[in-house]
């Protein structure tokens, strides 16, 4: 089964053993509030169903999800995934990192690894992501790993009673391959 490695992280498949840890980290309102699908308050025990639904979607090739773990402590610190569109050979990136681990570059490190996996292993033609414009931590990651800004859909979603603008970012395989080969030259 898939397992990716970066300098400080392992990205590995999630299992039902991760349920308590997922609830502990994703149960923080500051983590949930800028995502579209983490419930708040997080219903106790419900992450088991969440994990099982992900494992089932993975079997159908609709999603690929990794647990982000700190290598040193072997501890789950977040989740990252690609929602897959078979028809368009496209992946939509999404991620969260537990609040006490923010600002250490882990989100960027995990996202870079997933881009490589998506383009080089899954052979996707495009990877894209949407971020609340009010969530710089997220769109900065997308900019840093090379996704290009494609536009903003105004007040496109609502969360906890407030509307949010969504900024879309995307990267094509041809762009990723070019950037990788340019980097390899130096
Ligand atoms: C978004 C999130 C994944 C960022 O994770 P992270 O590990 O802290 O990200 P990084 O440390 O790699 O930082 C990425 C960049 O964003 C910047 N950044 C992070 N948080 C920021 C904030 N609150 N305000 C401004 N910039 C911020 C960092 O400074 C860094 O940019 P820099 O290198 O130019 O300084 C994390 O905040 C999170 O899980 N938030 C809740 C869930 C969420 O919003 N998910 C995304 C949904 S689209």
Image (cartoon, rainbow, N blue to C red):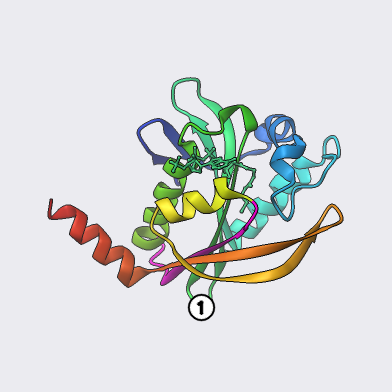
Q: Is residue 30 above or below residue 62?
A: above
Quarter-of-image position of residue 102: top right
Q: Position of residue 100 (x, y in %)?
A: 61, 27
**Figure quarter occupied by ligand 1:** top right
In the image, is 164 to the left or to the right of 97?
right
**Span colored in magenta:** 122-134
Query: Callout 1: few (<14), some (14-19), or many (20+) C-alpha neighbours within 10 Å?
Result: few
| Residue 1 appears in the picture as rendered | no
Residue at the spot of label 1: 88
At which x and y percent is residue 27?
A: 76, 36
User: Residue 58: which quarter of the image?
Assistant: bottom right
Relative to 82, residue 106 above or below:
above
Does 133 appear in magenta? yes
103 magenta-colored: no
Residue placed most toward the observer, 101 or 134: 134
Whether residue 112 sits left or right of residue 183 in the image: it is right
Query: Exactly how many numbered labels are in the figure?
Result: 1
> Can residue 71 be seen by looking at this rendering?
yes
Give how far across and how far down residue 114 sits, in percent: 44, 51
Task: Residue at 74%, 67% (x, y): give it.
Answer: 155
SS for dot 1: loop
Image point (38%, 66%), residue name = 123
Question: In which quadrant of the rendered view does residue 97 lie?
Answer: top right
Q: Is residue 32 left or right of residue 83?
A: right
Quick one: 123 or 96, which is closer to the camera? 96
Q: Position of residue 74 (x, y in %)?
A: 50, 24
Q: Residue at x 72, y 38 (%)?
A: 30
């Amino acid at each position: 089964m898939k397992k990716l490695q970066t300098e400080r992280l392992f990205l590995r498949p999630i299992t039902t053993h991760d349920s308590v840890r997922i609830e502990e980290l994703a149960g923080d309102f500051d983590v949930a509030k800028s995502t579209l699908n983490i419930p708040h308050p997080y219903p106790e025990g419900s992450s088991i169903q969440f994990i099982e639904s992900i494992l089932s979607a993975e079997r159908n090739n609709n999603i690929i999800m990794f647990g982000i773990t700190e290598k040193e402590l072997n501890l789950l610190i977040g989740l990252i995934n690609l929602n897959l569109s078979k028809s368009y050979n496209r992946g939509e990136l999404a991620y969260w990192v537990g609040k006490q681990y923010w600002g250490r570059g882990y989100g960027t490190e995990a996202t870079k690894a997933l881009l490589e996996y998506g383009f080089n292993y899954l052979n996707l033609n495009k990877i894209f992501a949407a971020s609340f414009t009010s969530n710089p931590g997220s769109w900065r990651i997308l900019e840093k790993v090379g996704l290009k800004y494609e536009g903003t859909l105004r007040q496109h979603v609502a969360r906890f009673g407030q509307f949010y603008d969504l900024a879309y970012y995307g990267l094509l395989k041809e762009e990723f391959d070019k950037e990788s080969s340019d980097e390899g030259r130096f």
